[in-house]
Amino acid sequence: MNVSSFRLMGVLGGMGPLATVDFLRKVVDATSAASDQDHIPFIVYSVPQIPDRTAAFFGWGPSPFSAMLKGVRTLETAGVESIAIPCNTAHLWHSQLQAQTPVEILHIVKATLEQVELQYGQPRLGLLATAATIESGLYQSHGQGKFDWVLPTEQELHEHVMPAIQAVKAGDLSLASDTLKRVAHHLFSRGAEVLVYGCTEVPIALQAESFPSIDPTLALAKQLVFRSTGCELMV
C-alpha cells in the first residue's frame, strides 16, 4: 500500500502510559505488513496528567473531560479521521467528547463485544475492570441484553482488583498478575465462561495467562487498523 491508501488515525492516550504503549504495540501486531510503509499512520497524544477517571466518577477528584477534550482538539487539528482512547473508564465521557467533535471516536466497549461474539458467541462474561467501569454499568449496559455478567464482589474489587491495577501503573507486574489471577479464578468458579479484561492495565498483568478471554485493547487496535485501511487486517 502507498500512504494515500491509508486514513490518518489518532490515539488519545496517557491513561496510563504503559497501557498506551501496549495499545500501540497491538496496533502494529494487528496490521498485516511486510515493510515500514505497510503500517498505518497515526498521531499519539499521550498526557498522563489527565485527571484520574475513577476518582472523578466517585467524586473524589476533578473531571478529566476538559483535559481529554484538549487531546481530542489537538488530534482533530492534526487531521485525524478517527480517534481511539485506550482507557476503558475514560469511555464514561465518550458521548460528551463525541458531541464536541465531528471526528469519529471509536468505542472500546462496542469493539470488545463485537469481538466476543466473533470469537465465542454469547458466553457468560466475567469482568475485570475498575470500580468506576463496573459500578457505572459501562459494559453491562451495552450488548442489547445478549450477555450475562459475573462481576467481582465489592471486597474483591476494592481490595484486589483496584490495587492490582495500581500496581501495573507503578510497574509491579508480578504483584498485579498474582492478584488478578486469584480474582479471575473466583469469577470462573461463579460461572464466568470468558473474561473481559475491561481495564487496559489488566491484559498487561495477565499477558502470560491462557484464560478464555477478550482483550479490549486488542479489539480497539483491530478497529483502528480497519478504519485506517478499510481492510480486515486482523490477527
Image: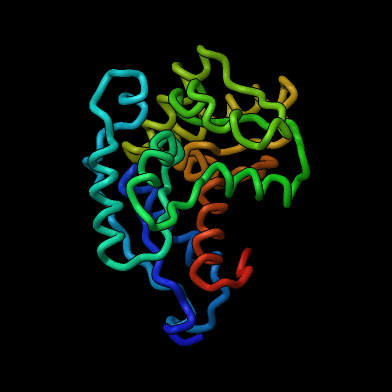
Q: Is residue 223 above or below residue 161?
A: below
Q: Position of residue 80 (x, y in %)?
A: 36, 65
Residue for point 70% across, 41% down: 212
* Nearer-the-camera pick, 98 or 113: 98
Q: Is residue 201 visible?
A: no
Q: Is residue 235 above or below residue 178?
A: below
Picture quadrant of residue 77: bottom left
Residue for point 30% across, 47% down: 14
Q: Does residue 49 appear to the left or right of 55 in the view shown?
A: left
Colouring convention used in this rendered image of the protein: rainbow
Count of numbered badges drawn on the protein: 0
Q: Position of residue 122 (x, y in %)?
A: 76, 39
Residue for point 50% across, 61% down: 224
Q: Is residue 110 visible?
A: yes
Residue for point 38% across, 56% down: 102
* Nearer-the-camera pick, 174 or 124: 124
* Nearer-the-camera pick, 127 or 43: 43
Q: Is residue 78 above or below residue 21?
A: below
Quadrant the C terminus occupies: bottom right
